[in-house]
Amino acid sequence: MGDRAFQALYKLALDPIAETLEDPNCCGFRTARSRQDAAGQCFIVLANCNRAQWILEGDIKGFFDNISHDWLIANIPMDKAILIKWPKVGYSRKRKALSE
């Protein structure tokens, strides 16, 4: 429980930073963004004759399983000692600890 609270505090601190750096048209995995926001942005872009005339939908299988931990450590503005430990922690399911 303490780990989740600690992660929630870091999320509160990092969300405003991420919002300033993200693509304004990206809606995935973002606070206060939804499928409706994405659909609205598609409508705006496709309604303009001089803009893109296609939409790409994708799902990169295993993306979060294969993200570079070195890149995260170099680019995420937070305490590096904590950030180094988080990807190695593992997870729990039904109160049974598992590791990756």
Image: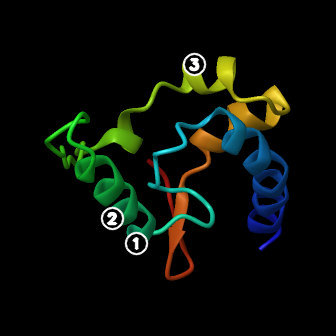
At numbered mark 2, what does the secondary structure look like: helix, strand or loop? helix
Q: Which residue is mark 1?
A: 36
Secondary structure of residue under mark 3: helix
80 with respect to 63 (left or right): right
* Within-10-Å neighbours for mark 2: few <14, some 14–19, many 20+: few
Residue 21 appears left or right of 38 = right
Front position in the image: 29 or 95: 29
| Residue in the picture at 61% in, 67% down | 32
Q: Residue at x 57, y 18 (%)?
A: 70
Q: Give the camera-side residue of 74 and 22.
A: 22
Q: How is the image coloured?
A: rainbow
Residue 39: numbered disc: 2
Q: Nearer the viewer, residue 95 or 27?
A: 27
User: In the rendered view, would you say 30 is above or below 64?
Assistant: below
The structure residue drawn at horizontal position 20% and vertical position 41%, both measured from the top left corner, is: 49
From the top left corner, tell me how far across and down residue 61 is, in percent: 22, 45
Labels 2 and 1 touching (C-beta < 8 A): yes
Indicate which disc, 1 or 3, sits on the residue closer to the N terminus: 1
Q: Amino acid at mark 3?
A: Asp
* Foreground tag (1 vs 3): 1
User: Gap between marks 1 and 3, in whole Å?
Assistant: 34 Å
Could you tell me if the residues under marks 1 and 3 are in contact, i.e. CB atoms within 8 Å? no
Number of numbered discs on residues:
3
Measured in 3D between alpha carbons, the distance from the residue under mark 2 to the one under mark 3, in whole angstroms, is: 34 Å
Marks 2 and 1, how far apart at CA: 5 Å
Mark 1 surroundings within 10 Å by alpha-carbon count, few (fewer than 14), some (14 through 19), many (20 or more):
few
Pointer 2 or 3: first along the chain: 2
Badge 1 marks a residue whose secondary structure is helix
